[in-house]
Each structure stands twice: as C-alpha cells, then as structure tokens.
Image (spheres, rainbow, N blue to C red):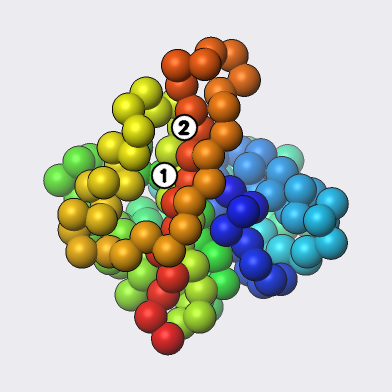
C-alpha cells in the first residue's frame, strides 16, 4: 500500500479494527523516511476500543463510525479502504463518499485487495463506475502462488 504514498501526510484506515494496520503503515513509512500520521475509523465500537487500548498514544485518532456516511474532522492526505467488507450494492457509494468528503483535494484513495485470485476484479469494477485508477501495486501472497495482494489508487480531483 505504501507504493501509493508519495509524500508525508495523514492516513486514514477505514475499518481499522484493532489498529494493527495503522501501526504497521506508520512504522513502514518511517523506515522509508516518510512521516505518516495514522487515523482510524471503525464501525464496531468494541474493535475501536480495542484499538484505543492497544494504541493509547493515538486514542483520540480512532473513531467509531460507518464510513458510508462518516464525516471526518478534517480531510486526509491518504485514505485506505477495502471493498470486500462492503455490501456489493454500496461499494460505489463508499468510493464516491470517500473521494467527495474524506480524501483531501490533493489526496489519494488507496483501495487494498487481499487474496484475490482473478486479476483486477475489484479494480475493474471501480473503473467501470467511472473512477480513473492512477496507479497500482501487487505483491505475491506469502502462502500460495495462486493468490495476490494488490492495491490501486485514485487521485482526488484538485
């Protein structure tokens, strides 16, 4: 996912669960000399509280909300989401809402796809909705060669 990060900024993890990815993105970016300020939004109050307990220094950055209609305190440089856990009929709505409200004007929406067998299925769907994919990255799955982990991103309109 960090292939999409081209400068320091804020990063929102949509569906942050226990905050593990927030923590990893911050550390991985730091290894590359990039300062990312991680934030999280989680629909489950129990998982959000777990993230706050795990990451007390970021407690005030972890919010409970449904990303389909959540309004952030400020737009983010980067917003990371997946579409796997969103009902198929609402996926386009989520992408549009994130780009309209959550991603900063010069920001980037990063869509992660894990364990996908067919090449670009989710990316093809997003493109078919009229969104222009600005870039993509792919990594082999650590356990099986038939699966890949990929991310692609959409730049917000400036």
Q: Dot 1: within a 10 Å radius of its alpha carbon, few (fewer than 14), some, or many (20 or more) residues?
A: some
Of the two numbered discs 1 and 2 in the rendering, the one whose residue sits closer to the viewer: 2
- In depth, the one of 129 and 56 nearer the eye is 129
- In depth, the one of 32 and 77 nearer the eye is 32
* Residue in view at x 65 percent, y 67 percent: 6
Give the mark, 1 or 2, whose residue is nearer the N terminus: 1
* Residue in view at x 46 percent, y 21 percent: 147
Q: Is residue 1 visible?
A: yes
Residue that mark 2 sits on:
114
Pointers 1 and 2 in contact (CB under 8 A)? yes
Q: Which mark is residue 117?
A: none
Farthest-out residue, left? 89
Q: Is residue 15 visible?
A: no
Quadrant of residue 68 in the image?
bottom left
Residue that mark 1 sits on:
82
* Residue 128 percent coordinates (x, y): 18, 54
- In depth, the one of 154 and 27 nearer the eye is 154
Q: For the residues marked 1 and 2, what is the alpha-carbon distance in whole angstroms?
A: 9 Å
* Residue in view at x 20 percent, y 41 percent: 88
């Amino acid at each position: 996912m960090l292939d999409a990060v081209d400068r320091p900024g804020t990063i929102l993890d949509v569906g942050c669960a226990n905050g593990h990815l927030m923590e990893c993105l911050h550390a991985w970016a730091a290894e590359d000399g990039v300062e990312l300020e991680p934030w999280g939004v989680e629909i489950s109050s129990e998982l959000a509280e777990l993230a706050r307990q795990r990451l007390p220094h970021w407690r005030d950055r972890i919010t409970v909300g449904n990303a389909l209609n959540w309004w952030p305190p400020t737009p983010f440089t980067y917003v990371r989401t997946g579409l796997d856990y969103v009902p198929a009929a609402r996926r386009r709505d989520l992408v549009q809402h994130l780009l309209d409200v959550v991603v900063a004007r010069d920001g980037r929406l990063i869509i992660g796809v894990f364990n996908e067998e067919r090449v670009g299925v989710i990316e093809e769907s997003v493109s078919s909705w009229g969104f222009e994919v600005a870039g993509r990255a792919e990594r082999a799955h650590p356990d099986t060669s038939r699966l890949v982990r990929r991310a692609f991103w959409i730049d917000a309109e400036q």
